[in-house]
Image: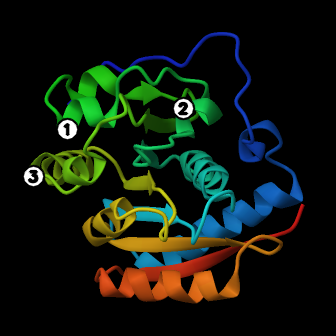
Amino acid sequence: MVLSKRKPLASTKKRNLITYTNPDSIISEQYRTIRTNLHFIHGEKKNNTLLVTSPSKQEGKSTTIANIAVSMAQQKEKVLLIDGNLRSPSIHQIFKTSNESGLTNVLSSKATFEETVFSSEIGSLDILPSGTVPFNPAELLGSKAMRALLEKVSRLYDIILIDSPSVLEVTDTKILANLSDGVVLVVRQDKTNKEYAVESKKVLEYAKANVVGVILNEKN
């Protein structure tokens, strides 16, 4: 299937994407290490869906998942990055794309995937923004339409990465975690409460999520 993808906004600099702006930096190498470790965890399996989340807000999960996505795309992998944070999205801001339509519009049958997906113009990395803020985010994410979408894109991409709300914030994350093949928890050295981190792991396990690793986001 050939997708006719939207383009990012012109003449804008992508935010917080050090793997793109400075690929030779030490931090970029750390992201490449994370990418490699994720491949070791999943072996030769393809079409894996990975969720990246954090115990609470402002722990760097969106920046982390964006850079992992770029790092994977730089290795010629076909990657889809989905913004599953329907209440407070940020992926469109990082990649400087429109958020007028996206995941919620696809799930509510107001647009097709082909109409809403963006080309990041970084390797074969595509972006599906969150779309219009809905009144029923949890219901949309737990719908048959969401499962059907993940089944569809799993045939089109080598890996699907999903950014989500923080674990302890809303129920949305538990729903997405249950739909994903693996979950990566991002914690920040100078921010994350240890009790929250432990509680997050328990919540994810209760949701029958496969927690495959934890990323320590160091103090700036």
Circle 1 residue: 107
- Left or right, 73 with respect to 128, comes to right
Mark 3 or mark 1, which is nearer the start of the sequence?
1
Numbered circle sitting on residue 214: none
Position of the C terminus, as image quadrant, is bottom right
Could you tell me residue 205's position as x and y percent?
A: 37, 87
| Secondary structure at numbered mark 1 | helix
**Where is 141 relative to 197, above or below?**
above
Label 3 amino acid?
Lys
Numbered circle sitting on residue 144: 3
Could you tell me residue 131's position as x and y percent?
A: 37, 30
Mark 3 or mark 2, which is nearer the start of the sequence?
2
Q: Residues within 10 Å of mark 1 (few under 14, many from 20)?
A: many
**Residue located at (63% from left, 51% from top):** 71
Q: Quick one: 158 or 145, which is closer to the camera?
A: 145
Could you tell me residue 39's position as x and y percent?
A: 50, 71
Confirm whether residue 116 shows in the render: yes
Circle 2 residue: 92
Query: Is disc 1 in contact with disc 3, using a CB cutoff of under 8 Å?
Result: no
**Residue located at (78% from left, 55% from top):** 28
Label 1 amino acid?
Leu
Residue occupying the far front of the picture: 135
